[in-house]
Amino acid sequence: MSWKRTGAVFTAVLLIAGAFVGAYLLAAADAPDSAEARQIRAEASDGTYAVAQLGAFGDGLRYGLEQGLADGTADGEEQGRAAGRAAVDSVLAERSFNARDVRPQPVASLPGSGGVLVVGDSLEVLTSPYLKQYLPGVPLTVNAEGGYNSIQIFDLFNESYDPSQSVIVFDAGTNDNPAYPEILAGNLDKVASTVGGRCLVVPTIHGFTVDGVDNTGKNQVVRSFAASHPKTQTPDWAGFVEQHPEMMQADDLHPIAEGADARARLIAQGVRACLAMDPRFGG
């Protein structure tokens, strides 16, 4: 309600109250004469006493309302500012959360239709039976032969490679002479030039030391290849064997059943990381 309307209401209240009081006092004047009646009649002749009392009441009420309105306005402004600050903080917090939640979305970046080709040596002969349980629903082709070096495994790749395949597991190098890591490097390059934009999974190597030469050079080849081919995944089989020698057979080359299962999990993680690059395959 505006102040003008409030003032009009109070004026009407004062007038009505004055009329009632005046009527009461005039009616009392008709009673039998007495000193009190005469006094009341004298005071009510112009309604001065009653109006004065109501005027004081009205002034007090008006003052109280003015103060109430002033205090209410101040409180309302402060509450409004507080609510505004809270609203701004809420919007900023939401924007900050949304900004944190925005992540680059993967794009269709893998050729093929999601198939996986696995080629390798005896390690893969032992590993591949466990792969299917860790890659459910993934079309899987395995071609592995015990004792094969990376040159022969490249031949297996050529036999089995199909354009529908989006991921290639090239599990090679264990049977290569560690003194010649460039052989593995050459075969990796040939695979990469054949598959184009497909994703490669190349495990690190735990193999024999020959004439004092260990597998450091071959593993440097694997890591260097991965660094120059960003889509490449490198399950760390060499690191796993170092941490879990109990998972190996007496020859310290082939894993026992539990080790083969663990190796399959490592390779499957690499395959899933590849497939996650493409939203068509669950990325």
Image (spheres, rainbow, N blue to C red):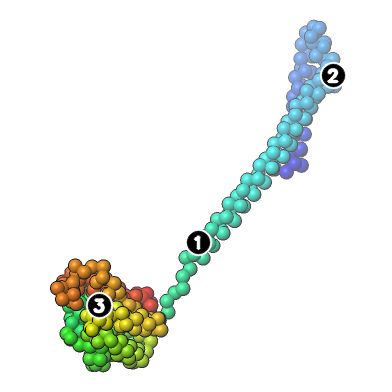
The furthest residue to the front: 212
Q: Position of residue 121 (x, y in %)?
A: 20, 84
Helix, strand or loop at mark 2:
loop
- The answer to whether residue 119 shows anywhere in this view is no
Q: Amino acid at mark 2?
A: Ser
Seen from the viewer's position, the closer of residues 217 and 75 is 217
Q: Is residue 269 above or below residue 62?
A: below
Image marks 3 and 1: residues in contact by CB distance under 8 Å: no
Disc 3 crowd, CA 10 A, few/some/many (<14, 14-19, 20+):
many
Secondary-structure class at tag 1: helix
The residue shown at (18%, 82%) is 122
Q: Which mark is residue 206?
A: 3
Q: Using the image as rendered, state which of residue 118 and residue 205 is in the foreground.
A: 205
* Mark toward the start of the polypeptide (3 vs 1): 1
Q: Secondary structure at mark 3?
A: loop
Q: Residue at x 30, y 75 (%)?
A: 235
Place of residue 184 in the rendered image (x, y in percent of width and height, measured from the top left): 30, 88
* Viewer-side label of 2, 3: 3
First in sequence: mark 2 or mark 3? Answer: 2
Mark 2–mark 1 Cα distance, whole angstroms, equals: 78 Å
Tell me the quarter of the picture where residue 146 sits: bottom left
- Residue beneath disc 1: 97
Badge nearest the viewer, 3 or 1: 3
- The image's mark for residue 45 is 2
